Image (spheres, rainbow, N blue to C red):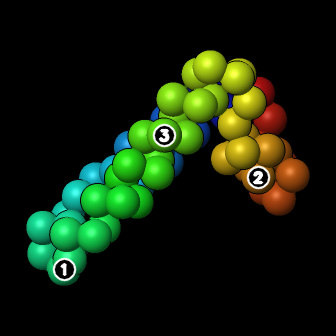
Amino acid sequence: MRNRLVRGIAGTFVLISLLLAVYVNINWLWFTAFVGANLLQSSITKWCLLEDILRKFFGVKD
């Protein structure tokens, strides 16, 4: 459950930041890069900050 939620949130962030880059300011692509870098880091280290946030603050379980 938590992995699906993380992927859904990350995908939503990417799509929103792309729309903001097109319609507001190109610098929103830095947020897209940040999300991508965090996804890459979590695939290498097997640790994801968003998972910890979801578990601690919202009680989301596996």
Label 3 vs label 1, nearer the camera: 3
Picture residue at 67% right of the left edge, 47% below the top = 50
**Which residue type does callout 1 highlight?**
Val
Cα–Cα gap, marks 2 and 3: 18 Å
The residue where tag 3 is placed is 37
Residue 40 position within the rendered picture, expressed as x and y whole percent measured from the top left: 51, 29
Q: Specify the quadrant that holds the C terminus.
A: top right
Q: Earlier in the sequence, mark 3 or mark 1?
A: 1
Work out which residue is located at the far left of the displayed protein and give it.
22
Q: Specify the quadrant that holds the N terminus.
A: top right
Q: Which mark is residue 53?
A: 2
**Which residue type does callout 2 highlight?**
Ile
Query: Can residue 25 be seen by looking at this rendering?
Result: yes
The residue where tag 1 is placed is 24
Instruction: Tell me if residue 4 comes above or below residue 18 in the rendering.
Output: above
Residue 41 in the figure: left or right of residue 62: left
Cα–Cα gap, marks 3 and 1: 22 Å
Under circle 1, the secondary element is: loop
**Which residue type does callout 3 highlight?**
Ala
Label 1 vs label 2, nearer the camera: 1
Residue 57 position within the rendered picture, expressed as x and y whole percent measured from the top left: 83, 59
Picture residue at 69% right of the left edge, 37% below the top = 48
